[in-house]
Amino acid sequence: MAHHKQIPKTFCTTREAADLLGVSLRTAQLWAESGLLEAWKTGGGHRRIARQSIERLLANPEVRGIQLGATPRRRADDLVPVATLAPFNILVVEDDPVLRRLYEIKIRSWPMKPNISTAGDGYEALIRMGNSRPDLLIADLQMAGMDGFRMLQTISSSPELAGMTIVVVSGLDAEEIAHRGTVPEGIPVLPKPVPFDQLRDIAERLEAGRQAPGRTEPA
């Protein structure tokens, strides 16, 4: 019997993209909105995603790590009882590898023993946030690739990331920040060198709020 070779589509729906990438539908939507996936909308308002951009993202080692580490409990975390809360998670976005290593060393020594993950730019950070929302995001502004300004704009326009606690740590002064872009209202900007004591105080307050009886969100 003759077999006809199927020609792969050059585009996918958002759900098909999510299945191919091994992530949730909400994650695929976030990646499309942020530009990680090349997407457009049809005349009827349906999003289409370029197959080539999916393949490029699949080649990214960070995405492969997400697929290997994915669990079926993506949406159940919000329902975990206080007594069995997962460890406090911190994501640091910083392009200087030496400084990223310093963050890891310092934060892992905190009494609360938080989990820490790092990203070298905004794109990598959004990949990580799409899979697992951190309890605290610490971000630089001046980075190659997607810088902190654009990353924060993407986060502020994404409902699934609304309310995330974010702290900016930057070597830029207020005048330079105003010239380069804007930081969304309500996000504190701390100066470099990194003020680890202040960051620890913020993390401990969030952790205390997370464990308070009857509380579902930090103060």
Image: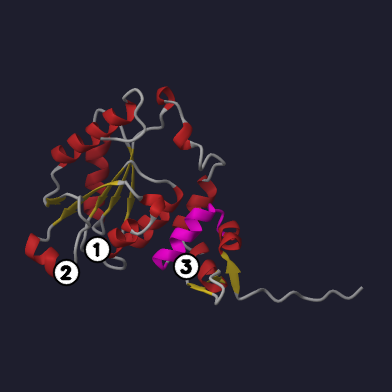
Task: Determine the residue positioned at 36% across, 25% down.
Answer: 214
Question: Quadrant of residue 33 in the image?
Answer: bottom left
Relative horizontal placement of residue 38, taking residue 20 as reference (left or right): left
Percent from the top left, x then y, of residue 207?
Answer: 29, 31
The residue pinned by badge 1 equals 149
Task: Determine the residue positioned at 31% across, 68% down.
Answer: 145
- Mark 3 or 2 closer to N-term? 3
Mark 1 is surrounded, within 10 Å at the Cα level, by few (under 14), some (14 to 19) or many (20 or more) other residues, namely many
Residue 180 marker: 2
Residue furthest to the front: 44
The residue pinned by badge 3 equals 37
From where the camera sits, is residue 72 visible? yes
**Render colour scheme:** secondary structure
Question: Quadrant of residue 62 in the image?
Answer: bottom left
The quarter of the picture where the C terminus appears is top left
Q: How many labels does the image show?
A: 3
- Mark 3 or 1 closer to N-term? 3
Relative horizontal placement of residue 132, taking residue 104 as reference (left or right): right
Asked if the residue under mark 2 is in contact with the one under mark 1, i.e. CB atoms within 8 Å, the reply is: yes
Percent from the top left, x then y, of residue 8?
Answer: 67, 73
State the SS at label 1: helix
Percent from the top left, x then y, of residue 47?
Answer: 53, 69
Instruction: Tell me the magenta residue range.
Output: 21-35
Magenta stretch prevailing secondary structure: helix
Q: How far apart are marks 1 and 2 (CA)?
A: 8 Å
State the SS at label 2: helix
Task: Determine the residue positioned at 51% across, 43% down.
Answer: 74
Mark 3 is surrounded, within 10 Å at the Cα level, by few (under 14), some (14 to 19) or many (20 or more) other residues, namely many
